[in-house]
Image (spheres, rainbow, N blue to C red):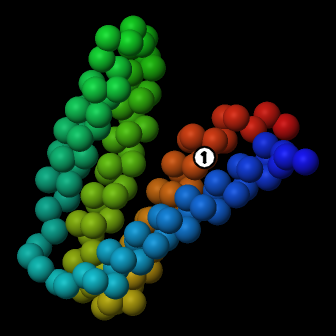
């Protein structure tokens, strides 16, 4: 017998959450303090990456303007959370050392993984 949609969704949530947590843990454990964080640059790079991604994804597909804007906002959120998490490691390090850096990147990675799973698979679960 096959698994129900809810069971598959839970499995994907766990899978994506763990992958995000592992990536966050990696970025936290191997962080070495460097220069000062540049939050504006992280936001600008996130916006640019989201814009390029949306253009490539929607090129000649006839999507509505509303769908393109929503797609941009969702992708920008992913990039911004990731880039700000990486950028703010220095602040976390200054406030609480390596343990706080690990906690910050672990939480951000897990959150991104869960958000991605929810976006990709959550709409498929109707029960």
Q: Residue furthest front?
A: 1
Residue 101 appears in view = no
Q: Residue furthest top?
A: 62
Q: Going 18% across and 47% down the picture, which residue do you hit?
A: 45
Q: Is residue 106 left or right of residue 101?
A: right
Q: Going 20% across and 54% down the picture, which residue do you hit?
A: 42
Q: Going 58% across and 49% down the picture, which residue do you hit?
A: 117
Q: Residue furthest left?
A: 35
Comparing 97 with 55, the one in front is: 55
Estimate the x, y position of residue 24 in percent, counting from the top left: 40, 71
Comparing 112 with 66, the one in front is: 112
Estimate the x, y position of residue 112 in percent, counting from the top left: 47, 57
Task: Examine the rendered structure and indicate whether residue 34 appears above or below residue 59.
Answer: below
Q: Going 16% across and 68% down the picture, which residue do you hit?
A: 37
Q: Residue furthest right?
A: 1
Q: Is residue 112 left or right of residue 76?
A: right
Label 1: state its secondary structure. helix
The image quarter containing residue 87 is: bottom left
Residue 76 appears in view = yes
Q: Which residue is denoted by mark 1 in the rendering?
A: 118
Task: Examine the rendered structure and indicate whether residue 112 appears above or below residue 60.
Answer: below
Task: Examine the rendered structure and indicate whether residue 95 appears above or below residue 72.
Answer: below
The image quarter containing residue 30 is: bottom left
Label 1: how many Cα within 10 Å (few below 14, some 14–19, many 20+): some
Comparing 79 with 30, the one in front is: 30
Comparing 83 with 96, the one in front is: 83
Estimate the x, y position of residue 40 in percent, counting from the top left: 16, 53
Estimate the x, y position of residue 10 in percent, counting from the top left: 72, 55
């Amino acid at each position: 017998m096959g698994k129900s949609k809810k069971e598959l969704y839970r499995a994907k949530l766990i899978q994506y959450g763990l992958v995000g947590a592992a990536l966050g843990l990696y970025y936290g454990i191997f962080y070495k303090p460097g220069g000062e964080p540049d939050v504006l640059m992280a936001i600008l790079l996130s916006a640019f990456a989201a814009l390029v991604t949306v253009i490539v994804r929607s090129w000649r597909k006839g999507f509505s303007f509303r769908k393109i804007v929503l797609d941009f906002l969702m992708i920008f959120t992913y990039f911004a959370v990731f880039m700000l998490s990486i950028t703010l490691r220095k602040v976390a390090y200054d406030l609480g050392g390596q343990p706080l850096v690990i906690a910050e990147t672990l939480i951000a990675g897990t959150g991104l993984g869960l958000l991605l799973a929810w976006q990709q698979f959550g709409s498929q679960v109707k029960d």
